[in-house]
Structures are given as structure tokens and as C-alpha cells.
Image (cartoon, grey):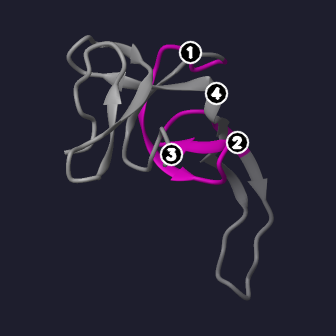
Amino acid sequence: MKKIRKGDTVIINTGKDKGKQGIVADLISERRVIVEGLNMVKKTTKPNPSKGQQGGIISKERPLDISNVAIFNNTNSKADKVNFKKLKDGKKIRIFKSNQEAIDV
């Protein structure tokens, strides 16, 4: 079970966007995540008339290492660690480590 999933609110720990919050848009692999609107880079593209694409400079999100993001706890308004808890019915859920509140509802 993964500690950070698609749709989670995370906060960036390092880099040019340190301290900013965003929502996880995609998990590239077990170690890379894309956060909406953060870690933006500019890329030049050539025009492709057969596909109807114009050339120019576009901004896109680049993946971050999962160790550089932490899940955001709304009750504390701080970054938090994730722990796991098994319920009586055998279901495994994610909880915040600081206040034992369930992340998955």
C-alpha cells in the first residue's frame, strides 16, 4: 500500500517550490510524483503540421522524487508522516502519524 496516492494534498520539502502545496496529479512510478502546478519547466517544441501542432514555448510539470514531498495534514496545517492501521474487518487504512486521524474515508 502506498503512502502517497493520486489526489492527495502534499507540501514540497525541497527545491525551488519549497513550502508550496499542491494536489498529486499522477504517480509515475513508486518513487516519482507529479504535483499540479508545481515544479514547472519551460520546453520548446517544433511545429508539427501533420498533427496540427504549433511550435513555441510551453510550460509543463516535471516529476518530483517522492522523498521531496510530504502529505499535508489540514487539522495541524503542517506536513505529516503516514502510518497504517488495520481495522477489525481486516481493511488496511492510512492514518496521520501525529494525531492518528484517518486519511482514507
Is residue 64 part of the magenta span, yes or no? no
Q: Write the residue at 66% across / 43% down.
A: 32
Instruction: Compare residues 7 and 82 and report the one nearer the observer.
Output: 82
What residue is pinned by disc 1? Answer: 18
What residue is pinned by disc 2? Answer: 42
Distance from the alpha carbon under mark 4 to that under mark 3? 13 Å
Identify the mark nearer the N-term, 4 or 3.
Answer: 3
- Using the rendered image of the protein, determine whether residue 62 is visible from the camera's viewpoint: no
The amino acid sitting under disc 2 is Lys
Q: Which residue of the protein is positioned furthest toward the bottom in this rendering?
A: 50
What residue is pinned by disc 3? Answer: 2
The amino acid sitting under disc 1 is Lys
- Using the rendered image of the protein, determine whether residue 43 is visible from the camera's viewpoint: yes
Identify the mark nearer the N-term, 2 or 4.
Answer: 2
Instruction: Compare residues 87 and 38 and report the one nearer the observer.
Output: 87
- The image quadrant of residue 74 is top left
Q: Write the residue at 57% across / 45% down.
A: 34
Q: Quadrant of the C terminus?
A: top left
* CA neighbours of label 3 inside 10 A, class few (<14), some (14 to 19), many (20+): few
* Residue segment shown in magenta: 15-42
The amino acid sitting under disc 3 is Lys
Identify the mark nearer the N-term, 4 or 1.
Answer: 1
Identify the mark nearer the N-term, 1 or 2.
Answer: 1
Distance from the alpha carbon under mark 1 to that under mark 2? 19 Å
What residue is pinned by disc 4? Answer: 67
Distance from the alpha carbon under mark 4 to that under mark 1? 13 Å
